[in-house]
Each structure stands twice: as structure tokens, then as C-alpha cells.
Image (cartoon, rainbow, N blue to C red):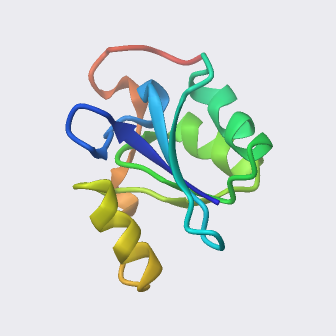
Amino acid sequence: MIAITYDKETNSVFQHFGRTEYFYLFHEETGEEKIIDNGGYSHHDLAPYLKSLGVSTLICGGIGSHGVEAVESAGLKLIPGAFGDVKDVIKEFKDGSLVGNPNAMHSCSHSGEHHHN
């Protein structure tokens, strides 16, 4: 199963993994699609939450270094730097043309919004 950080208002990829309120889930084998909330989790707890739901791949916009560590620790494949309508992103994933952007992985302290110890 694929999870995409999701912005409900624009039907697009949400651009901050640790602050996403929703995920768009796509089941590769059945084609089932659904929207779920973040379960009340943030940052380090989001990746294990997704893993517990059967997710194997996370597609997101931007993601901080702590998020990357959490995703890798949970054993999820990460495709950062995605943007645009989720239906287009799913289509690109299915046809193999979705390419991650490592520049979308950033330090959370760049804007002073929050700090990790």
C-alpha cells in the first residue's frame, strides 16, 4: 500500500510530512483508494503508524531529517519531493515515471518553526 501526504482542500500532495493531517492511501493490488487522518500522530510516530496500516511506500513533499530517520527505521520506501494532484502522482507511480527529489529532504530548523533535540 502507498501513502501520500494529502491536502484535502486542494486534492494535492501536502508539502510537510511532519505536519500532514491526512494521508491518501492507494492499494497497489486492489486499486482501492481512501483518505485517512494522521491518527493524532506527528513526526516520529507517523511512520510506525503507517507501517501498522500495511503501508510499504511513503510519497510526500518535503520531509525533515528526523522524518527521514523515522521512515527508514519503520522500513518504508520513501519518495520525497512529490507535488501536484494525488491522482496524477498515483498515475506517475504506477507507470514508473515518479522520481523522488532528495532536495526535498531538509533540516527542520531552517525556518525556526520547531526544533528537535
- Residue at image position (65%, 46%) is 71
Q: Is residue 59 left or right of residue 68?
A: left
Q: How many marks?
A: 0
Vertical side of 50 occupied by 77: above or below: below
Residue 78 in view (yes/no): yes
Residue 99 in view (yes/no): no
Q: x, y percentage for residue 45? A: 68, 27
Q: Which quadrant does the C terminus fall into? A: top right
Q: x, y percentage for residue 78? A: 55, 59
- Residue at image position (43%, 29%) is 20
Q: Is residue 4 left or right of residue 70?
A: left
Vertical side of 69 occupied by 109: above or below: above
Q: Nearer the viewer, residue 83 or 72?
A: 83
Q: x, y percentage for residue 91? A: 36, 74
Quarter residue 43 falls in: top right
- Residue at image position (31%, 28%) is 110
Q: x, y percentage for residue 55? A: 68, 53
Q: Which quadrant does the N terminus fall into? A: bottom right
